[in-house]
Image (spheres, rainbow, N blue to C red):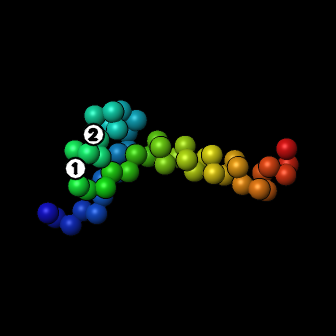
Amino acid sequence: QRGAEGVILGCTEIPLLVKQEYTKIPLFDTTTLLAEAAVREALREEHLIKL
């Protein structure tokens, strides 16, 4: 109602309580986002060549 485009779930426990199906506002789980970014970075071709 006040113009929020999403909610950042910035604590590791919050996503255990707040689920996307409970709200229409997009939720951003920072733990998941960080893990996905770390995997993407680790699997980049430049990193694989060094192995």
Query: Is residue 39 or residue 13 the one in the foreground?
Result: 39
Q: What's the CA distance linking mark 2 and mark 1?
A: 9 Å
In the picture, the disc for residue 23 is 1
Q: Residue at x 85, y 49 (%)?
A: 50
Q: Position of residue 30 (x, y in %)?
A: 44, 46
Residue on which disc 2 sits: 18
Q: Position of residue 9 (x, y in %)?
A: 35, 45
| Image quarter in which the N terminus is found | bottom left
Give the quadrant of the C terminus.
top right
Name the side, left or right, on which 48 lies relative to 15: right
Numbered disc 1: secondary structure: loop
Q: Earlier in the sequence, mark 2 or mark 1?
A: 2
Q: Quadrant of residue 25?
A: bottom left
Q: Secondary structure at mark 2?
A: loop
At x 77%, y 56%, the residue is: 45
Q: Residue furthest front?
A: 21
Query: Mark 1 packing: few (<14 Cα in 10 Å), some, or many (20+)?
Result: few
Q: Residue at x 66, y 52 (%)?
A: 41
Residue 15 image label: none
Q: Which residue type carries mark 1?
A: Thr
Q: Amino acid at mark 2?
A: Val
Residue farthest toward the left in the current orientation of the protein: 1
Q: Are discs 2 and 1 less than 8 Å apart at CB?
A: yes
Dot 2: within a 10 Å radius of its alpha carbon, few (fewer than 14), some, or many (20 or more) residues?
few
- Could you say where residue 14 lies in the image, as x and y percent from the top left? 32, 37
51 sits left or right of 9 in the view: right
